[in-house]
Amino acid sequence: MKNKIGIIVVLILIAVFAVIAFKWIKHRMEYVITDAVFVETNNLSNISFKRVSGKIIKFYKKEGDKVKKGEILAKIDPKDYVLQLEKIKKEINSLIFKKQALEEKKDRINKQIDKNIQIVKISLKENKKLQDSLLSQIKGIDSRLSQLKKDRERFLNLVNKDLAPRRKLEEIETNIDVLSSQKEALLAKLEQLKLQKQSLNEKVKLTKIKKLQIKEIESEISSLSSKINSLRKSKEDIENLIEYTKLRAPFDGVIAKRFKSVGEIVSSGVPVFAIYPLNDIYIKVLLEETKLKGVKIGNKAIIHIDAYPDEYFEGVVYEISPAAASKFALVPRDITAGEFTKVAQRIPVKIKIIRGKIELLKVGMGGEVEIEKK
């Protein structure tokens, strides 16, 4: 009885082993298995400070941290740029004050010129009216004097011949004297009006000179405006430099490497971080050429990462290199001398991860891949 039980147990074990062996052989026939596996990315970017240099005073992220686009990663001391900004701000404010003072002066002179022009125009108009009135009066007096002088000549002849009384002649001469005095007074007033007109014309000339002064002020204002605009551009540039003292993430990703430490002096363009986008991670497989048969684009792949043995990752083949990895080595093998040892070449295969916690993966991790064969 015991022998029968023993035989049954052996047969069961043989059957179990046969099933396991069958499954193992079947799996080996359906899948290509290799451990030449690495987590890779196409876009590992070195991040550096732009246009600024100085001492790093703070890091906000460390290696392995996830970052969002625009997040601050590190900062250098902005003190020198802040001092430059304050200096330019003071210069701008000083020039703006000068410009405002000149504009006020220009407005004041303009108002004065407008007022003077208005007064001069009214005065010239009034002067002309008075001169015309005086000339009209003088013309009337000249006409009357001419007539009186003719009457005096006529009465003088009559008086000499005793044909008219002398009293009449004296009356005419008195009228001539009165009119002559009136004419002299009017001529004096006319001369005063002419002098007044000359004075008004001088004021017009002074007004023109003040207009030239305004042009000079406008030219100075324009020059100050140009300087202010130039300084404002410099101010904007320095404000940008101050913003550049904050190193920001260019995209969503993961910090792969930090090259500098707090207190180090860095120059513009020197790498501070290496960062890669999380959604750009893929699995790179260096597959032996002897295992390449049946591996096609679109084939399913099961990925095992050494760091996470309990995590399941699944992917698909999306690229198979047309050349062996050895062709891209920095120092390719020289076989022209006839020295040659046959070695199985490895073909780079890229696998896109479609399932699993991709955020756990870090560039450079290793593992094992099983690629379905078709």
Image (cartoon, rainbow, N blue to C red):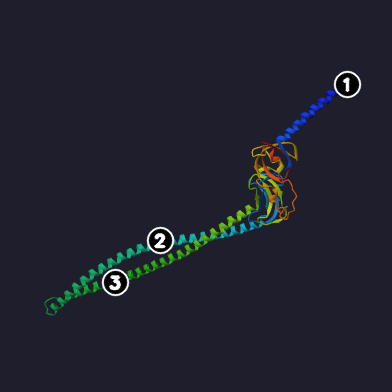
Residues under labels 3 and 2: Cα distance? 31 Å
Q: Which comes sooner in the sequence, label 3 or label 2? A: 2
Q: Residues within 10 Å of mark 2 (few under 14, many from 20)?
A: few
Q: Nearer the viewer, residue 19 or 103?
A: 19
Residue matched to label 3? 187
Assign a secondary structure to mark 3: helix
Q: Earlier in the sequence, mark 1 or mark 3?
A: 1
The quadrant in which the C terminus is found is top right
Please say if 158 is above or below 40. below
Separation of marks 1 and 3 at Cα, in angstroms: 168 Å
Q: Position of residue 77 (x, y in %)?
A: 68, 54
Residue 15: percent from left, percent from top? 79, 27
Q: Does 215 appear above or below 287?
A: below
**Can residue 288 be seen by looking at this rendering?**
no
Image position, residue 100 (x, y; %): 51, 59
Q: Where residue 2 is drawn, which disc sits there?
A: 1
| Foreground tag (3 vs 2) | 2
- The amino acid on which the numbered mark 2 sits, given as a three-letter code, is Lys
- Quadrant in the rendering for residue 11: top right
Kind of residue indicated by mark 3: Leu
Residue 138 left/right relative to 245: left
